[in-house]
Image (tube, helix red, strand yellow):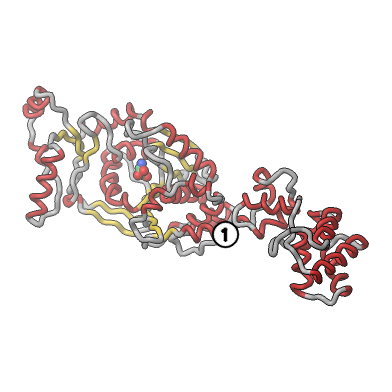
Amino acid sequence: MTVTTRFAPSPTGTLHVGNVRTALHCWLLAKKHGGRFLLRIDDTDLERSREEHVAAIKADLEWLGLGWDGEERQSARFDLYEAEFRKLIAAGRVYRCYETAQELDLKRKVLLGRGLPPIYDRAALQLTEADHAARAAAGESPHWRFRLDHTAPIEWTDAIRGKQHFEPAKMSDPVVRRADGSWLYLLPSVIDDIAMEVTDVLRGEDHVSNTATQIQMFAALGASPPRFAHEALLTGTEGKLSKRLGSLGVAALRAEGIEPEALVALLARLGTSDPVEPIAEREVLIDNFDLGHFGRAPARFDEAELHRLNAQIVHRLPFARVAHLLPAGMGEAAWDAIRPNLEHISEAADWWRIVTGPVTAPRLDEADRAYLAQAAELLGKGGADWQTLTGALKQASDRKGKALFLPLRQALTGMDHGPDMAALLPLIGREAALERLEAASRPGAPS
Ligand code: GLU
């Protein structure tokens, strides 16, 4: 069976770093096995789901290069849920309940007070058809619970967490449908995973106990469950309850100049035994991806690490990847010369302005000015390459090291540091370089 994964965001907000990580891992798992990665929009909550969030989620996935091979929307599948639900009613696996939130809360408190686990007592299973009729006559609608099978433990081998074991008798029968007919997440997700032929469910470990109940739902619907993997959650550098991390969205990182390759390279490896490296090639990440390398400890997301990785990635990006982001006229040679000095691609424009000029050199002392006049003369005569120029200057003046190079850099770029001058000089060109050297050699100028 083709490996099929799905990413199932609820469009009640935009993607944050944690969701992106799950989406990426689902994508990598599918690609690793030549399989399919599906997008499922979990919009059963019609009130809180927003079209603009759906659009933003898709735009973020596209920006990250996480294309999907198929798409479903839960809001378009209510007929299917209804039909499957009827089967569960017929099989006696769902039942009607009427307890209010307050009543349930009270029951829980009583149990906790007695030192017992706060499990639903299944009181509603005792109701007769006459009781239900009386409730209906009084205008009350039931909510529905899934009746867990208590006869055997629920077990699975989680691809990250290993052997898992749950005792259904120690769990509450989960509510699957509200009194107003709307669906809770648990059952539609199972119905969809069956219909979409999902083979691997990969999600955060906050879903582990959901998985236990969902495994029984798969069986109740006559399907064998997919493989499951639950990854440890991300924490911020400040610890588990990181507000910043929970709200840190793709759009904000993008605005800070983070490239998708950097976010992907970090999130692909964070929390695994593989080192985080500036890998811009997706194939390398795919080949290397292995759920067996995932650790069980929470993975720490450090924004500073992301920014460092981003710089390393920018230094490696080929011209073809960035050309559309560069100022007009800036070609491949300029990109190759300038990229080692960038943290963000947007800074390329600053260096390009320096190449194209005008630049203002700092005020230099008389000796440096004389030296630059000498440089201008040599440049006027000789070749316009850096080695030739500095070689000739070394002979002509008795300067070396910083005294030899720095005034030239200052005159040519107006800066004390920057890209390799050997690469910059041909970009500046002989004529402009000559003008800059002459201007810097004139007394009193430039200021
Ligand atoms: N919509 C669910 C969530 O965002 C999906 C969980 C799942 O992957 O099954 O938590």
> Where the C terminus falls, by quadrant?
bottom right
Residue at numbered disc 1: 278
Residue 261 showing in the rendered view: yes
Q: Dividing the picture into quarters, in which one does residue 376 lie?
A: bottom right
Pick out the residue farthest to the right.
Answer: 381
- The residue lying at 55 percent from left, 59 percent from top is 309
Query: Label 1 CB, ligand 1: below 8 Å?
Result: no
Q: Position of residue 141 (x, y in %)?
A: 16, 28
Q: Against 418, is 74 above or below?
A: above
Q: Nearer the viewer, residue 309 or 294?
A: 309
Q: Position of residue 90 (x, y in %)?
A: 21, 31
Q: Dividing the picture into quarters, in which one does residue 302 lie?
A: bottom left
Q: Dividing the picture into quarters, in which one does residue 377 lie?
A: bottom right
Label 1, residues with CA under 10 Å away: few <14, some 14-19, many ≥20: many
Q: Nearer the viewer, residue 325 or 374?
A: 374
Check disc 1 and give the amino acid type: Pro
- The image quadrant where one finds ligand 1 is top left
- The residue lying at 31 percent from left, 51 percent from top is 206
- The residue lying at 9 percent from left, 22 percent from top is 137
Pick out the residue farthest to the top.
Answer: 137
